[in-house]
Image (tube, rainbow, N blue to C red):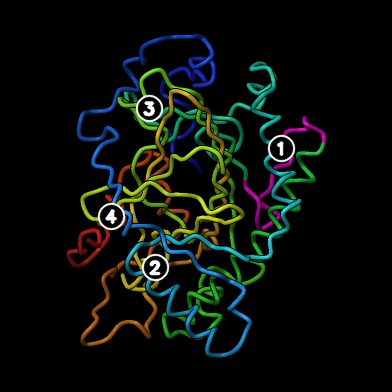
Amino acid sequence: MASSNLLDWPEPIVPVQTLSNSGMSSLPQQYIKPPSERPSDVTNDPNLSIPVIDLASFSNAPEHHQEMLKAIASACKNWGFFQLVNHDVDTEAVRRMRSAWREFFDLPMEEKKVHANLPVTYEGYGSRLGVEKGAILDWSDYYFLNLFPSDIRNLDKWPKIPTDLREATEKYACQLISLCQVLLKAMSSSLGLEEDYLHNAFGGSDGISATMRVNYYPRCPQPELTLGLSSHSDPGGITLLLTDDNVEGTQVRKGDAWVTVQPVPGSFLVNVGDQIQILSNGRYRSVEHRALANSDKERFTISFFCNPRGDLPIAPARELVGPGSPALYQEALTFSDYRKYMRTKGPSGKTQVQSISSAMQPGPAA
């Protein structure tokens, strides 16, 4: 049963798109971040860029296969992120997905509000994460859906307008869950585990969970004072982000600086979530990332989250624990229990995964 503090939002919800369209010239107080959390410390070092991995080599010659696994291992250890190209997701499926959801966010506000969400499941149209009263909010709206396994879908939450949205979402989701299964196998192998280890730890073919959040970042009158999405690591397994090809805005923490992602056309931005950090016993690291606001352009992205089945306890793989590598996470938690923190507190850096570590975690890679 849901906790009482997750049954409703603590304050009335005002869509950010409504605020943006009002023509206001200054940011409402509840969106102004403390100085330490405002967008600064951005690096333009050309030597720092998100690794790009070509998935086509995964099924090619053995030597290319091994090089690709080494590239994945390096990216997951040193960045927690990589851009994936030649992933075989149909370009038409991507185009239809973007088109349908952009059309949804262009609908009149009253039509979107019919789908307003509650914090019990987050499914539907929303504008905040976390239920703490008086929290400083992010400058974004979103639409959240449960996708897999199919028995967790609530089609009543899927918009009927535009008319092709449901079909476009279904086809896109099927292709991305297949891609996630390939990535789980590659990550398992790159860790020295059996190829199906992570796939099975997530619940196997009938148990892997997947959700989606369509993110809309309206124009902001004072983007230097706020964020589109606060700094956080993803609580789940792996995330595939379909970036906006025309507007930058995703930033990844690297040491004490923030690196702006330069999207590769046709790619997905893949990142390690907290559950992979736990299962890998800290060898692969979930990394803080955030989204910027923009005064000149709106931005639109789609996050696909591949997660363990909610009732499975997640703990470090025994093969990765030994005398020289003690278990960093002693208490096994289910994903359903783990994600309650994000749903209560909202985006909060890496405080959650650090709080359950039995040893001091290393800081972000330099």
- In the rendered image, residue 155 lying in the magenta stretch gets the answer yes
Disc 1 element: helix
Query: Where residue 144 appears, x then y in whole percent?
Result: 58, 40
Residue extent of the magenta highlight:
146-163
Disc 2 element: helix
The CA span between labels 2 and 1 is: 31 Å
Disc 3 element: loop
| Label 3 close to label 4 by CB (< 8 Å) | no
| Camera-side mark, 2 or 4 | 4
| Camera-side mark, 3 or 4 | 4
Q: Which comes before the other along the chain, label 1 or label 4?
A: 1
Query: Where residue 45 appears, x then y in whole percent?
Result: 29, 52
What residue does disc 2 label? 76
Q: Which comes before the other along the chain, label 3 or label 1?
A: 1
Q: Looking at the image, which is closer to me, 44 or 112? A: 44
Categorize mark 3 by other alpha carbons within 10 Å: few (<14), some (14-19), many (20+): many
What label does residue 99 carry, if any?
Answer: 1
What residue does disc 4 label? 254
| Label 2 close to label 1 by CB (< 8 Å) | no
